[in-house]
Amino acid sequence: MITSAITSAASALSQILTINDDGLNKFSIIEKLFDILKSLAELFNKQSNSTLEKTKSEDFLFSKDLSDKIKQISAMDRLSKTLKD
């Protein structure tokens, strides 16, 4: 869900940069989008760190099934986005 929000905000930012309207206060909009993206990135970082901290260290740095755990998190993110839509 967080990655979807980051992608959407980045897409909106790209669209704003291509608009040629002198009456539009692009700086204000870009500043607000940047704040949103920064908050989402911090939240994503906290969630990722939480998941990695709960993972026990084994032969590999974060266990053999780390990629499976990351895939599960991504699947839950996609599912929650689907349910929200």
Image (cartoon, rainbow, N blue to C red):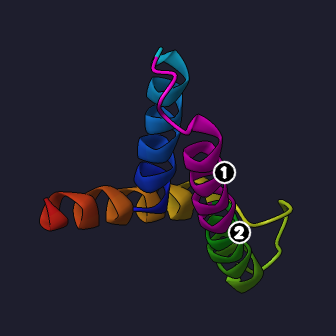
Amino acid at circle 1: Glu
Amino acid at circle 2: Glu
Residue in view at x 70 percent, y 68 percent: 42
Q: Which residues are magenta?
A: 21-40
In the image, 70: left or right of 60? left
Q: Assign a secondary structure to mark 2.
A: helix
Residue in view at x 24 percent, y 62 percent: 79
Look at discs 2 and 1 and give the one toward the viewer: 1
Residue with the mark numbered 1: 31
Judge by depth and name the residue closer to the eye, 78 or 54.
78
Q: Position of residue 81 (x, y in %)?
A: 25, 60
The residue at the far bottom in this view is 54
Q: Residues within 10 Å of mark 1 (few under 14, many from 20)?
A: few
Judge by depth and name the residue closer to the eye, 75 or 81.
81
Identify the mark at residue 42; answer none if there is no mark. 2
Residue 52 is a magenta residue: no
Q: Position of residue 43 (x, y in %)?
A: 63, 72
Residue in view at x 66 percent, y 61 percent: 35
* Prevalent SS, magenta region: helix
Determine which quarter of the picture holds residue 12. top left
Residue in view at x 50 percent, y 16 percent: 18
Q: Position of residue 85 (x, y in %)?
A: 13, 59
Residue 60 in view in this figure: yes
Judge by depth and name the residue closer to the eye, 19 or 15.
19
Q: Quadrant of the N terminus?
A: bottom left
- Decide which of tag 2 and tag 1 comes sooner along the chain: 1
Label 2 and label 1: CA atoms lie apart by: 17 Å
Q: Assign a secondary structure to mark 1.
A: helix
Q: Is residue 41 above or below residue 30?
A: below
Q: Position of residue 50 (x, y in %)?
A: 69, 81
Q: Is residue 57 above or below residue 79?
A: below
